[in-house]
Amino acid sequence: MRCKCIIFNSILALSSLSILFLFLTIHLSPITIHNPFIPVPSQQTFSLLIGILTRADLHSQRHFIRLVYGAQRTPPDVKIHVKFVFCRLTKVEQRALIALEILSFDDIIILNCTENMNFGKTYAFFSSLPKILPQQYDYVMKADDDVFIQLEGLSRSLKKLKKRDLYYGFVLPCTSYNPYSGYMAGMGFILSWDLVQWISVSDIPAQNQVGPEDKLVGQWLSMGNKGKNRVTEKPGMYDFPGTNGRCSHELIPETVAVHRLKRWERWLQVLTFFNVTRVRSSKMYSFDK
């Protein structure tokens, strides 16, 4: 009998301690319950899709550009995907070689259009994205294949901006700093995702596809009363020194994009200036000084 009393008293004491601990826990500190089925908020600042409009036959140029962007570091809190964009394939060799690119890199978008510059390709690009992409992005950039984009510089610039109704780029004419007059040059301009969705459903761009593609995009937005948040990235975006009058200036550290790199020596000068090709020393390879 005495043994049973001892056991009972021990249980009662433990229960009292448990109740006291629970009381103190509730009143002295917040309770955090981790539910593995509730996603943890992401620290990602923004996501960006860069669509480089090019032609199917330019295999070696695409691989070079892959190396250029693959060598650059991007901030850990942003997500940037680079895709190459062209129209329907027309040759047997294109289908074979581009199939290998897709299998190896998964960075190709093939639009349902005939290859062109100013006859609807840019419209086909933007209007197709909401229907074909497995995910949406905060921003979409249309870029030429002769432009170098410094991803860190672009990331710093975009982090300060709004994610809706945004129209961003290098405003023309060259001497203008007013993004609400003129339009963003085709070297590389950015639209927020809501504007991409609008292009995909609006009759305004659908019925106005013929003409200089960068100018048309500006007209679409003005006609639709869209793109109220407009930003021109000057002097961070420009044409390569000496190639296009007042749209050109010397290379600067604050660069976001350099356009008109149609010659290999221009690419070399740009990559050297921004230390893209700098390699850490290793016993496995040696570079002559």
Image (cartoon, rainbow, N blue to C red):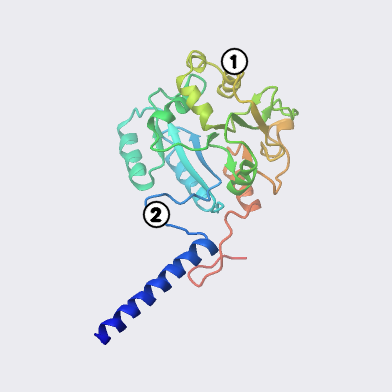
Q: Is residue 28 above or below residue 181?
A: below
List the residue tagged with mark 1. Answer: 223
Q: Nearer the viewer, residue 162 or 235?
A: 162
| Extreme-bottom residue of the structure | 2
Earlier-in-chain disc, 1 versus 2: 2
Give the distance between the C-alpha atoms of the residues marked 1 and 2, in whole angstroms: 48 Å
Q: Position of residue 225 (x, y in %)?
A: 60, 18
Q: Is residue 46 above or below residue 245?
A: below
Question: Which tag is nearer the camera, tag 1 or tag 2?
Answer: 2
Q: At numbered mark 2, what does the secondary structure look like: helix, strand or loop?
A: loop
Residue in the picture at 57% in, 22% down? 217
Tell me the amino acid under the disc marked 2.
Answer: Asn
243 relative position to 276: left or right: right
Quadrant in which residue 144 is drawn: top right
Tell me the amino acid under the disc marked 1.
Answer: Met
Q: Nearer the viewer, residue 121 or 20?
A: 20
Label drawn at residue 30:
none
Residue in the picture at 47% in, 65% down? 23
Q: Position of residue 277 (x, y in %)?
A: 57, 56
Residue in the picture at 27% in, 86% down? 2
Q: At numbered mark 1, what does the secondary structure look like: helix, strand or loop?
A: helix
- Quarter holding the C terminus is bottom right
Q: Nearer the viewer, residue 5 or 22?
A: 5
Determine if residue 2 is in view: yes
Q: Are marks 1 and 2 in contact (CB under 8 Å)?
A: no
Q: Badge 1: how crowded within 10 Å, few (<14), some, or many (20+)?
A: few
Q: Position of residue 276 (x, y in %)?
A: 58, 53
Q: Badge 2: how crowded within 10 Å, few (<14), some, or many (20+)?
A: few
List the residue tagged with mark 2. Answer: 35
